[in-house]
Image (tube, coloured by chain):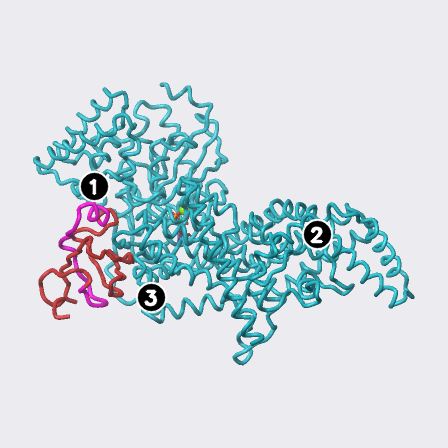
Chain colours: A cyan, B red
């Protein structure tokens, strides 16, 4: 009864199942968690823990672990390996599970039972959740859960996680199982003879016995299940990672001789396993599932698929859909954007009204409000973008798009599997890079991971929208249906993806050469996007955008402000500003006088900023960025935005707020940019400069978090450095080409 | 096209759209076959071709799956005459 003593620690309960069966939905329902849910396989790629608000007499509390989906415990991809590691207690940050909840898709029982048959071998207390219960009827099926529970010898609960049905039953069954595990000697797990492995060939079981003894004698005791996996999986598989280095060559030798021996006994590794397990499954489901014999007719889903997966209609649909999304973002976002912009200006004016000119007021108004405010303006864009992304992800379209793109990706030597991480990088490269874990082929995974940051993530939106709204004419073409601004935005979104094509080809050809990979992927069923899922995704993103504005962007704004404010003497400027404000407060002020003060202030401001640290850095950097059409200020702003792309908007906000050049009617950053001039009076910005900045940001690697994620996923600094160098080179070249082409086009 | 009407087993790619077949054999490297079987593609299961091509769209026991195996594995099916 050693277990009894452990009751003051939390119980760890793992949620496992095939991909897209509703694990994360159940996780959220059970503990109010915020795990991401989406209707395609491979949404969850790392483990996520949350505490379940449940009182349990044997454990202090319950820690629930949501895991990536997997079809079997012989892990082939990095996300599957996470699930296996957690289940076997090999993950350092998670305690070995005290119980497992296996989620089965009730509409695809046989296939899902395969994983269960393996999980049962781990000899952990197990609860089965038969999810998607609501879909059974629609698919013309009936399932006898009681009978299934009896034939499996495991507690079975019927659930519809997305509809929050059966959640209380899962909770009470889980408590029961945990209590039973602590109170009985059998811990409530199945006898060995009831497991699928009982029907493995005798010779195989004997070899496992022998190896079990051998590993014990080596001081490295392994569980039976682990030894079975070593024998069955090939040597690249995850199961080999548990072997200590000191005995690894000996283990390889032993496994090889054991396999040879088994081959002489007529045991065909690995296929005997699947056959034995399906044999076991067949016995368990007798009389459990009943399918109505319906006349086969073409379902709505088939009819939709006929269009959406059509060779070129499907592609056309995809492009049109993306175009429509970008058009509607520009259309819907404009008035809330104006609202926020107005709000930040109003706050700035209030602060100015309350404080006398000086460094503190400048820090607040020019540094923080102008910097952070300039970024916050783009909140509506981000919210609308994520609304569309969430809808696409939850309706089941994504896996169709991956299917269609496979034809194209296979020409590059990759597969449709790479499409989903790339698509997800349009939201943000970090989850995109993480999602490459689902790609089994290591070379494909590396190529995908290295091109993912080229996809136009949402952090580029502020840069694009700022430049587009300031320098692209607000016109509509094609009978008023297509806005030019929306079209330019769409083009910017496409640039990264288009450049990624030759980059992928080159990488695949010269850096990661190898045979073309295969592609197998399950398509999810179509469904109406769930309001909860969509709302949660948008909300989560909005919060993280605000959090970023409040942390990273706040800090860089302050730093940039300091660099642009010091070391100059601002006393003259402060005096002049105070005079101007007094003048403006006077209702019968002299127009000419106000004008004179304003121009003097602008002169002072631009003198001060050019003598500041930032100004000095600008002079140093100007020769490098001059070929791109930028002045030193843009150069410094770009340099300062190394931590994250959207920071450029904040730094420009601060620089132009400090640097003068505005008149009293100045309306935010876009207006400030339009009125910025070179010393000789020519405007700094025109369409060519704007395009060169946008192209630079489309291709550059200005995002520390992305580089850190690449480092973490590849376990080496080599790849983030490689990404940074190749992307920055591409960005510089791209910006230079576009600037010169545009200049020629605008002024031949 | 004549092939799929013959009573002999054919590679799954040869199934015409909207026709069905029963898997009778899987050939290729064993580790690939192991994966296919884990995914539920195994002898005796029913496959309906939805969208043929190098990457094809199939319904395997009613569940849609897309597949491109290239030369790594072959799924042989016995077409079912409607
Ligand atoms: N009809 C129905 N849909 C469900 C149910 N449970 C989950 N879903 C939907 O199934 C899809 C997949 O849900 P997830 O919770 O993301 O599945 P998952 O198992 O975590 O998926 P991966 O992390 O990709 O392995 C989502 O669109 C859910 O809304 C259910 O009981 N009934
Ligand atoms: Mg999940």
Q: Nearer the viewer, mark 1 or mark 3?
A: 3
Q: Is residue A202 left or right of residue A151?
A: left
**Residue A320 horizontal/vertical position (percent):** 44, 70
Residue that label 3 marks: A309
Residue that label 2 marks: A369
* A24 relative to A378, above or below: above
Q: Nearer the viewer, mark 2 or mark 1?
A: 2
Residue A254, numbered label: none
Q: Which residues are magenta?
A: B14-36
Q: Secondary structure at mark 1?
A: helix
Quadrant of res A670: bottom right
Looking at marks 2 and 1 on the same chain, the residue that comes earlier in the sequence is marked by: 1
* A319 relative to A78, above or below: below
Residue A391 visible in the shown view: yes
Identified at 19% across, 26% down, the residue is: A211
Position of the N terminus of chain A by quadrant: top left
Q: Secondary structure at mark 2?
A: helix
**Residue A256 horizontal/vertical position (percent):** 16, 33
């Amino acid at each position: 009864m050693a277990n009894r003593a452990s009751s003051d620690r939390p119980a760890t309960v793992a949620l496992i199942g095939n991909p897209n069966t509703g694990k994360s939905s159940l996780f959220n329902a059970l503990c109010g968690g915020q795990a991401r849910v989406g209707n395609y396989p491979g949404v969850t790629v790392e483990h996520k823990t949350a505490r379940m608000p449940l009182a349990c007499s044997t454990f202090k509390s319950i820690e629930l672990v949501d895991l990536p989906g997997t079809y079997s415990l012989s892990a082939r991809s990095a996300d599957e390996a996470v699930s296996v590691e957690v289940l076997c207690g090999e993950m350092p940050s998670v305690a070995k599970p005290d119980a497992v909840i296996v989620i089965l898709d009730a509409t695809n029982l046989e296939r899902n039972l395969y994983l269960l048959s393996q999980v049962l071998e781990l000899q952990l207390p197990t609860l089965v959740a038969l999810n998607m219960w609501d879909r059974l009827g629609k698919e013309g099926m009936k399932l006898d859960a009681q009978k299934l529970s009896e034939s499996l010898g495991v507690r079975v609960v019927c659930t519809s996680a997305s509809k929050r049905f059966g959640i209380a039953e899962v909770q009470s069954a889980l408590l029961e199982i945990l209590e039973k595990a602590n109170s009985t000697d059998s811990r409530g797990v199945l006898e060995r003879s009831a497991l699928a492995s009982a029907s493995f060939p005798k010779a195989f079981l004997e070899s496992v016995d022998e190896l079990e003894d051998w590993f014990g004698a080596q001081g490295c005791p392994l569980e039976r299940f682990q030894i079975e996996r070593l024998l069955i999986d090939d040597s690249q598989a995850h199961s080999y990672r548990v072997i200590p280095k000191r005995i690894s060559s000996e283990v390889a030798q032993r496994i090889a001789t054991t396999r040879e021996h088994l081959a002489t006994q007529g045991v065909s590794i690995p296929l005997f396993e699947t056959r034995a397990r399906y044999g076991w499954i067949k016995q368990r489901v007798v009389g459990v599932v009943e399918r109505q014999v319906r006349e086969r007719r073409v379902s709505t889903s088939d009819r939709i698929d006929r269009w959406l997966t059509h060779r070129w209609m499907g592609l056309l649909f995809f492009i049109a859909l993306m175009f429509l999304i970008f058009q509607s973002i520009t259309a819907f976002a404009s008035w809330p954007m104006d609202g926020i912009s107005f709000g930040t200006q109003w706050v700035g004016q209030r602060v100015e009204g309350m404080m006398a000119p000086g460094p503190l007021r400048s820090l607040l108004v020019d540094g923080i409000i102008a910097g952070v405010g300039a970024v916050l303006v783009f909140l509506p864009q981000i919210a609308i973008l994520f609304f569309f992304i969430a809808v696409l992800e939850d309706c089941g379209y994504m896996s169709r798009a991956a299917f269609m793109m496979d034809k194209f990706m296979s020409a590059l030597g990759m597969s449709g599997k790479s499409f989903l991480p790339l698509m997800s990088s349009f939201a943000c490269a970090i989850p995109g890079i993480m999602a490459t874990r689902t790609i089994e082929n290591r070379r494909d995974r590396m190529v995908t991971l290295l091109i993912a940051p080229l996809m136009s993530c949402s952090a580029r939106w502020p840069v694009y929208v700022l430049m587009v709204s300031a320098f692209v004419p607000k016109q509509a073409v094609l009978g008023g249906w297509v806005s030019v601004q929306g079209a330019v935005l769409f083009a910017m979104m496409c640039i990264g993806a288009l450049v990624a094509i030759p980059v992928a080809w080159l990488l695949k050809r010269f850096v990661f050469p190898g045979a073309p990979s295969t592609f197998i992927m399950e398509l999810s069923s179509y469904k109406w996007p769930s309001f909860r899922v969509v709302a949660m995704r948008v909300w989560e993103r909005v919060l993280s955008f605000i959090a970023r504005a409040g942390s990273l962007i706040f800090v860089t704004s302050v730093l940039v402000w300091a660099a642009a404010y010091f070391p100059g003497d601002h006393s003259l400027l402060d005096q002049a500003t105070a005079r101007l404000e007094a003048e403006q407060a006077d209702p019968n002020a002299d127009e000419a006088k106000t004008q004179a003060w304003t121009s003097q202030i602008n002169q002072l401001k631009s003198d001060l900023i050019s003598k500041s640290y930032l100004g000095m850095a600008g002079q140093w950097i100007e020769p490098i960025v001059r070929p791109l059409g930028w002045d030193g200020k843009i150069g410094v702003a770009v340099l300062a935005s190394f931590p994250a792309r959207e920071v450029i908007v904040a730094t420009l906000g601060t620089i132009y707020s400090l640097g003068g050049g505005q008149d009293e009617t100045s309306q935010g950053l876009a207006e400030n940019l339009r009125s910025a001039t070179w010393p000789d009076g020519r405007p700094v910005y025109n369409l060519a400069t704007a395009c060169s900045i946008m192209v630079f940001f489309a291709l550059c690697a200005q995002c520390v978090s992305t580089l850190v994620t690449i480092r973490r996923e590849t376990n080496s600094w080599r790849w983030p450095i490689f990404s940074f160098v190749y992307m920055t080179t591409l960005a510089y070249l791209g910006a230079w080409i576009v600037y010169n082409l545009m200049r020629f086009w605008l002024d031949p | 096209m004549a092939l799929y009407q013959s009573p002999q087993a054919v590679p799954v790619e040869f199934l015409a759209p909207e026709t069905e077949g029963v898997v009778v054999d899987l050939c290729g490297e064993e580790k690939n076959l192991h994966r296919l079987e884990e995914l539920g593609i195994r002898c005796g299961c029913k496959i309906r071709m939805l969208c043929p091509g190098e990457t094809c769209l199939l319904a395997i026991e009613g569940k849609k799956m897309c597949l491109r195996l290239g030369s790594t594995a072959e799924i042989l099916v016995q077409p079912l005459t409607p």
